Protein backbone atom coordinates (compact mmCIF):
# COMPACT_ATOMS: atom_id res chain seq x y z
CA UNK A 1 0.00 0.00 0.00
CA UNK A 2 2.84 2.39 0.86
CA UNK A 3 4.23 1.85 -2.65
CA UNK A 4 0.90 2.64 -4.24
CA UNK A 5 0.54 5.78 -2.16
CA UNK A 6 4.01 7.03 -3.00
CA UNK A 7 3.57 6.33 -6.73
CA UNK A 8 0.28 8.24 -6.67
CA UNK A 9 1.61 11.25 -4.83
CA UNK A 10 3.14 12.75 -7.98
CA UNK A 11 -0.11 12.50 -9.95
CA UNK A 12 -2.66 13.26 -7.28
CA UNK A 13 -6.11 14.51 -8.20
CA UNK A 14 -7.19 17.81 -6.77
CA UNK A 15 -10.48 16.99 -5.13
CA UNK A 16 -12.05 20.32 -6.03
CA UNK A 17 -14.30 21.39 -8.85
CA UNK A 18 -13.20 24.01 -11.35
CA UNK A 19 -16.28 25.98 -10.42
CA UNK A 20 -15.30 26.65 -6.80
CA UNK A 21 -11.98 27.98 -8.03
CA UNK A 22 -13.84 30.79 -9.79
CA UNK A 23 -15.06 32.54 -6.67
CA UNK A 24 -13.89 33.26 -3.14
CA UNK A 25 -15.68 32.58 0.10
CA UNK A 26 -18.30 35.17 0.99
CA UNK A 27 -16.72 38.50 1.94
CA UNK A 28 -19.89 39.42 3.85
CA UNK A 29 -19.89 36.30 6.01
CA UNK A 30 -16.12 36.50 6.54
CA UNK A 31 -16.39 40.11 7.68
CA UNK A 32 -19.12 39.06 10.11
CA UNK A 33 -16.87 36.42 11.65
CA UNK A 34 -14.03 38.96 11.85
CA UNK A 35 -16.31 41.51 13.48
CA UNK A 36 -17.38 38.96 16.09
CA UNK A 37 -13.78 37.95 16.70
CA UNK A 38 -12.61 41.50 17.25
CA UNK A 39 -15.75 42.95 18.84
CA UNK A 40 -16.10 45.38 15.91
CA UNK A 41 -19.25 47.03 14.60
CA UNK A 42 -20.38 44.82 11.74
CA UNK A 43 -21.12 46.93 8.68
CA UNK A 44 -20.96 43.95 6.38
CA UNK A 45 -24.01 41.78 6.97
CA UNK A 46 -27.53 43.14 6.86
CA UNK A 47 -30.02 42.18 9.48
CA UNK A 48 -32.70 44.33 11.07
CA UNK A 49 -32.17 45.45 14.65
CA UNK A 50 -35.77 45.05 15.76
CA UNK A 51 -37.60 42.06 17.20
CA UNK A 52 -39.64 39.90 14.88
CA UNK A 53 -43.40 40.54 15.14
CA UNK A 54 -44.89 38.79 18.18
CA UNK A 55 -47.52 37.08 15.98
CA UNK A 56 -45.07 35.19 13.84
CA UNK A 57 -42.92 34.20 16.82
CA UNK A 58 -46.02 32.87 18.56
CA UNK A 59 -47.01 31.02 15.40
CA UNK A 60 -43.58 29.37 15.21
CA UNK A 61 -43.76 28.41 18.91
CA UNK A 62 -47.22 26.96 18.40
CA UNK A 63 -46.03 25.02 15.36
CA UNK A 64 -43.19 23.43 17.31
CA UNK A 65 -45.47 22.73 20.29
CA UNK A 66 -47.85 20.92 18.00
CA UNK A 67 -44.98 18.88 16.54
CA UNK A 68 -44.61 20.51 13.18
CA UNK A 69 -41.12 19.08 13.12
CA UNK A 70 -41.01 17.00 9.97
CA UNK A 71 -40.34 17.74 6.32
CA UNK A 72 -42.36 20.55 4.82
CA UNK A 73 -44.23 20.07 1.58
CA UNK A 74 -41.36 20.58 -0.82
CA UNK A 75 -42.65 23.73 -2.48
CA UNK A 76 -43.98 25.18 0.79
CA UNK A 77 -47.02 25.08 3.06
CA UNK A 78 -50.23 25.98 1.24
CA UNK A 79 -51.05 28.72 3.73
CA UNK A 80 -47.73 30.48 3.17
CA UNK A 81 -48.00 30.16 -0.62
CA UNK A 82 -51.50 31.62 -0.36
CA UNK A 83 -50.13 34.52 1.69
CA UNK A 84 -47.39 35.17 -0.87
CA UNK A 85 -49.92 35.17 -3.71
CA UNK A 86 -52.26 37.51 -1.81
CA UNK A 87 -49.36 39.83 -1.03
CA UNK A 88 -48.37 40.11 -4.68
CA UNK A 89 -51.95 40.86 -5.58
CA UNK A 90 -52.33 43.58 -2.98
CA UNK A 91 -49.00 45.31 -3.49
CA UNK A 92 -48.26 44.79 -7.16
CA UNK A 93 -51.64 44.01 -8.67
CA UNK A 94 -50.32 40.65 -9.86
CA UNK A 95 -52.51 37.60 -10.04
CA UNK A 96 -50.50 34.61 -8.80
CA UNK A 97 -51.63 31.00 -8.56
CA UNK A 98 -50.28 29.72 -5.22
CA UNK A 99 -50.66 26.10 -6.36
CA UNK A 100 -48.67 26.43 -9.56
CA UNK A 101 -46.48 29.50 -9.36
CA UNK A 102 -44.95 29.76 -5.88
CA UNK A 103 -41.96 27.85 -4.50
CA UNK A 104 -40.98 28.42 -0.88
CA UNK A 105 -37.23 28.07 -0.46
CA UNK A 106 -34.54 28.32 2.22
CA UNK A 107 -34.37 32.08 1.95
CA UNK A 108 -34.30 34.19 -1.17
CA UNK A 109 -30.67 33.09 -1.41
CA UNK A 110 -31.75 29.57 -2.24
CA UNK A 111 -34.58 30.82 -4.45
CA UNK A 112 -31.99 32.62 -6.60
CA UNK A 113 -29.59 29.70 -7.02
CA UNK A 114 -32.46 27.23 -7.55
CA UNK A 115 -33.85 29.53 -10.25
CA UNK A 116 -30.51 29.89 -12.02
CA UNK A 117 -29.88 26.15 -11.87
CA UNK A 118 -33.36 25.60 -13.24
CA UNK A 119 -33.00 27.93 -16.24
CA UNK A 120 -29.32 28.12 -17.25
CA UNK A 121 -27.32 25.93 -19.57
CA UNK A 122 -23.55 25.98 -20.02
CA UNK A 123 -22.73 28.87 -22.32
CA UNK A 124 -25.74 30.97 -21.36
CA UNK A 125 -25.05 34.51 -20.26
CA UNK A 126 -26.64 36.35 -17.36
CA UNK A 127 -26.62 40.15 -17.23
CA UNK A 128 -25.89 41.56 -13.77
CA UNK A 129 -25.74 45.20 -12.73
CA UNK A 130 -22.64 45.98 -10.69
CA UNK A 131 -21.97 46.64 -7.88
CA UNK A 132 -24.18 43.70 -6.93
CA UNK A 133 -25.16 41.61 -3.94
CA UNK A 134 -22.23 39.24 -3.87
CA UNK A 135 -24.15 35.99 -4.27
CA UNK A 136 -25.13 36.64 -7.89
CA UNK A 137 -21.61 36.12 -9.27
CA UNK A 138 -21.04 32.67 -7.71
CA UNK A 139 -24.68 31.75 -8.42
CA UNK A 140 -24.12 32.39 -12.12
CA UNK A 141 -20.88 30.38 -12.12
CA UNK A 142 -22.45 27.46 -10.22
CA UNK A 143 -25.27 27.31 -12.72
CA UNK A 144 -22.82 27.15 -15.62
CA UNK A 145 -23.65 30.63 -16.91
CA UNK A 146 -21.29 33.45 -17.74
CA UNK A 147 -22.00 36.74 -15.94
CA UNK A 148 -22.03 39.91 -18.09
CA UNK A 149 -21.64 42.95 -15.89
CA UNK A 150 -23.19 46.34 -16.57
CA UNK A 151 -22.10 49.28 -14.44
CA UNK A 152 -24.40 51.24 -12.21
CA UNK A 153 -22.89 54.70 -12.18
CA UNK A 154 -22.79 56.67 -8.92
CA UNK A 155 -24.56 60.02 -8.61
CA UNK A 156 -22.57 62.90 -10.06
CA UNK A 157 -23.47 65.18 -7.16
CA UNK A 158 -25.42 65.31 -3.94
CA UNK A 159 -28.75 65.39 -5.71
CA UNK A 160 -27.91 62.91 -8.44
CA UNK A 161 -29.08 59.37 -8.87
CA UNK A 162 -27.48 56.03 -9.60
CA UNK A 163 -27.93 55.38 -13.29
CA UNK A 164 -26.86 53.01 -16.01
CA UNK A 165 -25.91 53.62 -19.59
CA UNK A 166 -28.60 52.45 -21.98
CA UNK A 167 -26.09 51.62 -24.70
CA UNK A 168 -23.93 49.63 -22.31
CA UNK A 169 -26.95 47.64 -21.17
CA UNK A 170 -28.04 46.97 -24.75
CA UNK A 171 -24.50 45.85 -25.63
CA UNK A 172 -24.65 43.22 -22.86
CA UNK A 173 -27.63 41.52 -24.51
CA UNK A 174 -27.14 39.09 -27.36
CA UNK A 175 -28.35 35.70 -28.50
CA UNK A 176 -26.56 33.98 -25.59
CA UNK A 177 -28.35 36.04 -22.95
CA UNK A 178 -30.65 33.82 -20.90
CA UNK A 179 -31.51 36.16 -18.05
CA UNK A 180 -30.96 39.48 -16.36
CA UNK A 181 -30.68 39.63 -12.58
CA UNK A 182 -32.33 42.71 -11.21
CA UNK A 183 -32.24 43.78 -7.58
CA UNK A 184 -34.59 46.57 -6.63
CA UNK A 185 -34.42 48.17 -4.10
CA UNK A 186 -30.76 47.54 -4.70
CA UNK A 187 -28.03 46.30 -2.42
CA UNK A 188 -25.51 47.90 -2.09
CA UNK A 189 -26.35 51.18 -3.86
CA UNK A 190 -29.80 51.80 -2.43
CA UNK A 191 -31.08 52.50 -5.93
CA UNK A 192 -34.76 51.91 -6.54
CA UNK A 193 -35.29 51.30 -10.26
CA UNK A 194 -37.77 53.71 -11.80
CA UNK A 195 -40.62 52.81 -14.11
CA UNK A 196 -38.86 54.18 -17.25
CA UNK A 197 -35.73 52.19 -16.37
CA UNK A 198 -37.77 49.04 -15.84
CA UNK A 199 -39.58 49.64 -19.13
CA UNK A 200 -36.24 49.91 -20.89
CA UNK A 201 -35.13 46.62 -19.34
CA UNK A 202 -38.50 45.11 -20.26
CA UNK A 203 -38.07 46.15 -23.89
CA UNK A 204 -34.64 44.49 -24.06
CA UNK A 205 -35.96 41.32 -22.38
CA UNK A 206 -38.75 41.09 -24.94
CA UNK A 207 -36.50 41.93 -27.91
CA UNK A 208 -33.84 39.37 -26.96
CA UNK A 209 -36.26 36.85 -25.45
CA UNK A 210 -34.67 37.06 -22.01
CA UNK A 211 -35.92 36.14 -18.54
CA UNK A 212 -35.87 38.71 -15.71
CA UNK A 213 -34.93 37.29 -12.32
CA UNK A 214 -35.70 39.97 -9.80
CA UNK A 215 -34.62 40.00 -6.17
CA UNK A 216 -37.05 42.21 -4.26
CA UNK A 217 -36.06 41.33 -0.71
CA UNK A 218 -35.98 45.04 0.25
CA UNK A 219 -39.40 45.71 -1.24
CA UNK A 220 -40.69 47.36 1.93
CA UNK A 221 -37.58 49.26 2.94
CA UNK A 222 -38.55 52.43 1.11
CA UNK A 223 -38.48 56.06 2.11
CA UNK A 224 -39.42 59.50 0.81
CA UNK A 225 -42.53 58.12 -0.88
CA UNK A 226 -40.46 56.14 -3.35
CA UNK A 227 -42.47 53.50 -5.18
CA UNK A 228 -41.24 49.95 -5.57
CA UNK A 229 -42.30 48.45 -8.89
CA UNK A 230 -42.09 44.74 -9.61
CA UNK A 231 -40.95 44.28 -13.20
CA UNK A 232 -43.41 41.37 -13.42
CA UNK A 233 -46.23 43.92 -13.28
CA UNK A 234 -45.11 45.55 -16.55
CA UNK A 235 -46.93 44.58 -19.70
CA UNK A 236 -45.24 41.64 -21.38
CA UNK A 237 -43.17 40.64 -18.34
CA UNK A 238 -45.42 38.38 -16.28
CA UNK A 239 -44.56 35.32 -18.39
CA UNK A 240 -40.82 36.08 -18.42
CA UNK A 241 -40.16 37.04 -14.81
CA UNK A 242 -39.13 35.15 -11.70
CA UNK A 243 -39.82 37.33 -8.64
CA UNK A 244 -37.78 36.48 -5.58
CA UNK A 245 -38.57 37.71 -2.09
CA UNK A 246 -38.57 36.50 1.49
CA UNK A 247 -39.31 37.12 5.14
CA UNK A 248 -35.76 37.84 6.25
CA UNK A 249 -35.59 41.61 6.14
CA UNK A 250 -39.24 42.64 6.38
CA UNK A 251 -39.94 40.55 9.47
CA UNK A 252 -36.46 40.54 11.01
CA UNK A 253 -36.05 36.78 10.70
CA UNK A 254 -32.88 36.35 8.65
CA UNK A 255 -32.06 33.14 10.54
CA UNK A 256 -35.36 31.45 9.75
CA UNK A 257 -34.42 30.96 6.10
CA UNK A 258 -37.77 31.53 4.47
CA UNK A 259 -37.93 32.97 0.96
CA UNK A 260 -39.76 32.23 -2.27
CA UNK A 261 -39.69 32.37 -6.03
CA UNK A 262 -42.79 33.31 -7.99
CA UNK A 263 -42.70 32.28 -11.63
CA UNK A 264 -44.92 31.01 -14.45
CA UNK A 265 -45.94 27.37 -14.04
CA UNK A 266 -43.39 25.82 -16.39
CA UNK A 267 -40.48 27.63 -14.76
CA UNK A 268 -41.91 26.98 -11.31
CA UNK A 269 -41.96 23.24 -12.03
CA UNK A 270 -38.26 23.39 -12.90
CA UNK A 271 -37.42 25.51 -9.83
CA UNK A 272 -39.35 23.09 -7.61
CA UNK A 273 -37.36 20.15 -8.95
CA UNK A 274 -34.01 21.84 -8.25
CA UNK A 275 -35.17 23.11 -4.86
CA UNK A 276 -36.33 19.61 -3.89
CA UNK A 277 -33.01 17.97 -4.65
CA UNK A 278 -31.03 20.79 -3.06
CA UNK A 279 -32.89 21.17 0.23
CA UNK A 280 -36.14 19.11 0.23
CA UNK A 281 -37.86 22.06 1.86
CA UNK A 282 -37.70 25.15 4.02
CA UNK A 283 -37.85 24.69 7.84
CA UNK A 284 -41.47 23.64 8.35
CA UNK A 285 -42.21 25.20 11.73
CA UNK A 286 -41.25 28.70 10.61
CA UNK A 287 -42.39 28.45 7.00
CA UNK A 288 -46.08 28.22 7.67
CA UNK A 289 -46.16 24.50 8.38
CA UNK A 290 -48.35 25.12 11.39
CA UNK A 291 -51.15 26.43 9.20
CA UNK A 292 -52.43 28.87 11.79
CA UNK A 293 -49.04 30.44 11.96
CA UNK A 294 -48.91 30.90 8.26
CA UNK A 295 -52.32 32.50 8.24
CA UNK A 296 -51.07 34.98 10.80
CA UNK A 297 -47.98 35.61 8.77
CA UNK A 298 -50.22 35.92 5.76
CA UNK A 299 -52.29 38.52 7.54
CA UNK A 300 -49.22 40.58 8.17
CA UNK A 301 -47.94 40.06 4.67
CA UNK A 302 -51.20 41.36 3.33
CA UNK A 303 -51.43 44.41 5.49
CA UNK A 304 -51.22 46.90 2.67
CA UNK A 305 -52.27 50.04 4.44
CA UNK A 306 -48.95 51.13 5.70
CA UNK A 307 -48.38 48.72 8.46
CA UNK A 308 -45.57 46.39 9.05
CA UNK A 309 -45.60 47.11 12.74
CA UNK A 310 -42.15 46.02 13.74
CA UNK A 311 -40.53 47.54 10.70
CA UNK A 312 -42.16 50.85 11.54
CA UNK A 313 -40.79 50.46 15.04
CA UNK A 314 -37.37 50.04 13.62
CA UNK A 315 -37.61 53.16 11.53
CA UNK A 316 -38.57 55.06 14.67
CA UNK A 317 -35.61 53.68 16.54
CA UNK A 318 -33.48 54.60 13.58
CA UNK A 319 -34.79 58.13 13.58
CA UNK A 320 -34.32 58.30 17.33
CA UNK A 321 -30.64 57.79 16.81
CA UNK A 322 -30.54 60.50 14.21
CA UNK A 323 -30.56 58.01 11.42
CA UNK A 324 -32.10 58.28 8.01
CA UNK A 325 -32.62 54.90 6.41
CA UNK A 326 -31.25 54.17 3.03
CA UNK A 327 -33.63 53.78 0.13
CA UNK A 328 -34.34 57.35 -0.86
CA UNK A 329 -35.97 58.64 -3.98
CA UNK A 330 -32.55 59.17 -5.45
CA UNK A 331 -31.33 55.74 -4.48
CA UNK A 332 -28.59 57.10 -2.29
CA UNK A 333 -27.67 56.71 1.31
CA UNK A 334 -28.78 60.09 2.52
CA UNK A 335 -26.72 60.31 5.64
CA UNK A 336 -23.85 58.32 6.88
CA UNK A 337 -25.20 57.95 10.34
CA UNK A 338 -25.84 54.43 11.33
CA UNK A 339 -28.86 53.10 9.49
CA UNK A 340 -27.21 51.76 6.37
CA UNK A 341 -25.69 48.82 8.18
CA UNK A 342 -29.00 47.88 9.73
CA UNK A 343 -30.47 47.00 6.40
CA UNK A 344 -27.62 45.80 4.24
C1 LIG B 1 -30.07 41.76 -2.17
C2 LIG B 1 -30.17 40.62 -1.21
N1 LIG B 1 -30.79 39.49 -1.60
C3 LIG B 1 -30.89 38.44 -0.79
C4 LIG B 1 -30.35 38.47 0.49
C5 LIG B 1 -30.48 37.27 1.36
O1 LIG B 1 -31.83 37.07 1.71
P1 LIG B 1 -32.34 35.75 2.42
O2 LIG B 1 -32.09 35.89 3.88
O3 LIG B 1 -33.81 35.70 2.10
O4 LIG B 1 -31.61 34.60 1.83
C6 LIG B 1 -29.68 39.62 0.93
C7 LIG B 1 -29.07 39.66 2.28
O5 LIG B 1 -28.37 40.56 2.65
C8 LIG B 1 -29.60 40.72 0.07
O6 LIG B 1 -28.98 41.84 0.43
Image: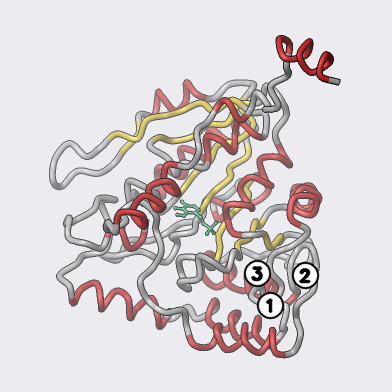
Left or right relative to 323: residue 261: right
Q: Which mark, by number, is residue 285?
A: 1
- The answer to which quarter of the image holds residue 77 is bottom right
- Between marks 1 and 3 in the image, the one whose residue lies nearer the viewer: 1
- Between marks 2 and 3 in the image, the one whose residue lies nearer the viewer: 2
The residue pinned by badge 3 equals 85
The residue pinned by badge 2 equals 72
User: What percent of the width, then of the height, locates residue 7?
Assistant: 79, 10
Q: Earlier in the sequence, mark 2 or mark 3?
A: 2
- The answer to which quarter of the image holds residue 312 is bottom left
- The answer to which quarter of the image holds residue 257 is bottom right
Q: Earlier in the sequence, mark 2 or mark 1?
A: 2
Residues 20 and 178: in front is 20
Which residue sits furthest right?
A: 1
Q: Earlier in the sequence, mark 1 or mark 3?
A: 3
Residues 51 and 40: in front is 40
Amino acid sequence: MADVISSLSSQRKIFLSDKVGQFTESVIRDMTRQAMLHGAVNLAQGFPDFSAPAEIKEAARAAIDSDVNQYAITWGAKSLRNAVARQMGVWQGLSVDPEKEVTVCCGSTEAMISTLLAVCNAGDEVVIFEPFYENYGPDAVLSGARPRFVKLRPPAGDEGEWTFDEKELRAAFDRHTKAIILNTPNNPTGKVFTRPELELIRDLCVEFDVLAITDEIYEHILFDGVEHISIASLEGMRERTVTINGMSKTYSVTGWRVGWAVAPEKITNAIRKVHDFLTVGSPSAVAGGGGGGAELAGGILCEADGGIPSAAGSFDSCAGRGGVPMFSSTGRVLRDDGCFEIWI
